[in-house]
Amino acid sequence: MTDTPSGGSTEPDDAVPAADAPERPDVLGPPRDGLTVGFVPGIMPDKWFSRWDERFGNITPLTRLALNEGVGVEALRSSAAHMALLRPDDEHGRPDATEFHAVRLFEEKPVVVLPVDHVLTLLDEVPVEELAEEFMMQDPTSIPEWAEASSRYRVQNPRRLPSMRDTSDGIELVAAGIGLMIVPMSVARHHHRKDLTYRVVEDMPPRPVDLVWLRDDRGNRAPEDEEILQEFVGIARGRKASSSRGASSTAENASRQSGRKKERPAPVRGKPGRAPSGRTSSRKNRSGTTSRTSSRAKKR
């Protein structure tokens, strides 16, 4: 997040240089060579990643790519990732349906982050109107419900936003008592501090989280690569292994070839000219029982 007043520069002077970004390959191979999934802060996809490793990890390894805020779309366009878990409302360039596939996974409640000694902590949930005279550490256009409620106050009390590189900087300023922030609940938990807390904001819609990947309208994507992408979509949407799509059968075939799949026991077959072993054993048991019974009767 880069928050500046309207008309100001979107690149702060103290921005992190590109050289400090994590290294990644210049060209990303097809998903069949290894699937790379990016995710923005606060989203916790460990359960989906673990399920992928269990089902297809030995066939198609999964690379986890932690992304900065609002760069999920950029990561897809630059081929840094095959798929991305992101918040479309927070992206610098919102994913266009003509360019991207998007699957809505869940929605998050918006919360206001505030110091633990703030008066609003007395409320279990905070109405938007209660925040009308609070200074927010973010561009009003990113929180339109609050922008509408605070429009008159902001005109009468103009304040310039300090330079911030991302939400982490904003959280530091909230802890310093400069202002408050409205963020998705998972983001507030991601930036947890002992001197801060949060409250759900009433009258604000939930924030969506989507799984996004590029369209292949020209048909350049190989069928096996498309199957792999669809398998991850299925995992993220809760599809069970028994109902997996085509890639699951590919994985099963590979598992069978690698010896992972257990072999079924061979059927029992009797030798030519002999009765099945079950009947022979049964006759012996019955005859043995009769013999023992007769001998006991003679002794008596």
Image (tube, helix red, strand yellow):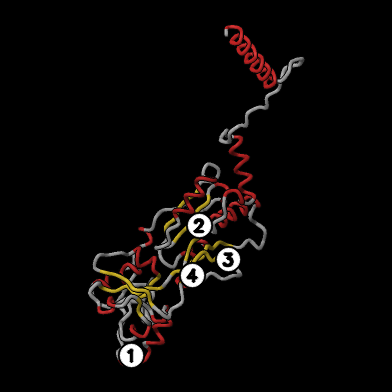
Mark 3–mark 1 Cα distance, whole angstroms, equals: 39 Å
Q: Nearer the viewer, mark 4 or mark 2?
A: 4
Q: Nearer the viewer, mark 2 or mark 1?
A: 1
- How packed mark 2 is, by other alpha carbons closer than 10 Å (few <14, some 14-19, many 20 or more), is many
Q: Nearer the viewer, mark 3 or mark 1?
A: 1
Q: Which mark is residue 81?
A: 2
Give the mark, 4 or 3, whose residue is nearer the N terminus. Answer: 3
Q: Amino acid at mark 2?
A: Ala
Mark 4–mark 1 Cα distance, whole angstroms, equals: 29 Å
Q: Amino acid at mark 3?
A: Phe
Q: Position of residue 169 (x, y in %)?
A: 30, 69
Q: Under tag 3, what secondary structure? A: strand
Give the mark, 3 or 1, whose residue is nearer the N terminus. Answer: 3
Q: Nearer the viewer, residue 200 or 105?
A: 200
The residue tagged 1 is 153
Mark 2–mark 1 Cα distance, whole angstroms, equals: 43 Å
Whether residue 119 is visible here, answered yes or no, is: yes
Q: Quadrant of residue 249?
A: top right
* Quadrant holding the N terminus: bottom left
Circle count: 4
Q: Which mark is residue 100?
A: 3
Mark 4–mark 3 Cα distance, whole angstroms, equals: 16 Å
